[in-house]
Amino acid sequence: MDAMARLLITRREAVLAGAAALSASALPAPAAALGQMDTAIRNVFGEATIRAGKVTLDLPPLVENGNTVPMTVSVESPMTKDNYVKAIHVFNDKNPQPNVISLKLSPRAGKAVIATRIRLAGTQKLTAIAEMSDGTLWSGTEEVVVTLAACLEDLP
């Protein structure tokens, strides 16, 4: 077989090569390709479906100092024995640790609301995820602009 004949490929070979390329691009991204917040969320919830809604993440849109940022998370729930919020998790995409806080709740809490202050390492997105008693997951996301960052220590 001469060199020119070897450079030509059959239509079947081209179709197979194209199909292989398409199937490889449809595979889920490896964890290293995900952002730190997405990786942290996958570590907690795996591949479970997380729906947007029911969760309100309340933070000031502009923060002068990232050392003490007020945050409130509330979840729409009757908080009854059969229908309540089991846990609330908050994640961020730029702090040295992507898991901000995780709290467990029971119907005895009365309301699915938490309020605290957090530190933020610059302008970033935060996501709160509520685990419901029926196994569903709901989320809310907010962006916060921070003019003076906190949490800038180097991790080992």
Image: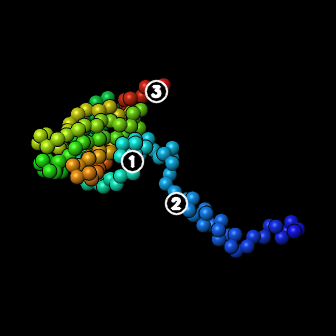
**N-terminal-most mark, 3 or 2:** 2
Q: Which residue is mark 3?
A: 155
Structural crowding at the residue carrying mark 2, measured as other residues with C-alpha within 10 Å and reported as few (<14), some (14–19) or many (≥20):
few
Give the spatial CA distance, label 3 vs label 2: 34 Å
The three-letter code of the residue at mark 3 reads Leu
**N-terminal-most mark, 1 or 2:** 2
Q: Which residue is mark 1?
A: 46
Q: Position of residue 86 (x, y in %)?
A: 22, 44
Quarter of the rendering containing residue 123: top left
- Choose mark 3 or mark 2, whichever is in front: 2
Q: Position of residue 34 (x, y in %)?
A: 47, 46
The residue under the point 61% across, 62% down is: 21
Q: Nearer the viewer, residue 17 or 148?
A: 17
Residue 118 appears anywhere in the view = yes
- Chosen colour scheme: rainbow
Decide: marks 3, 2 in contact (CB < 8 A)? no
The three-letter code of the residue at mark 2 reads Ala
Q: Position of residue 156 (x, y in %)?
A: 48, 25
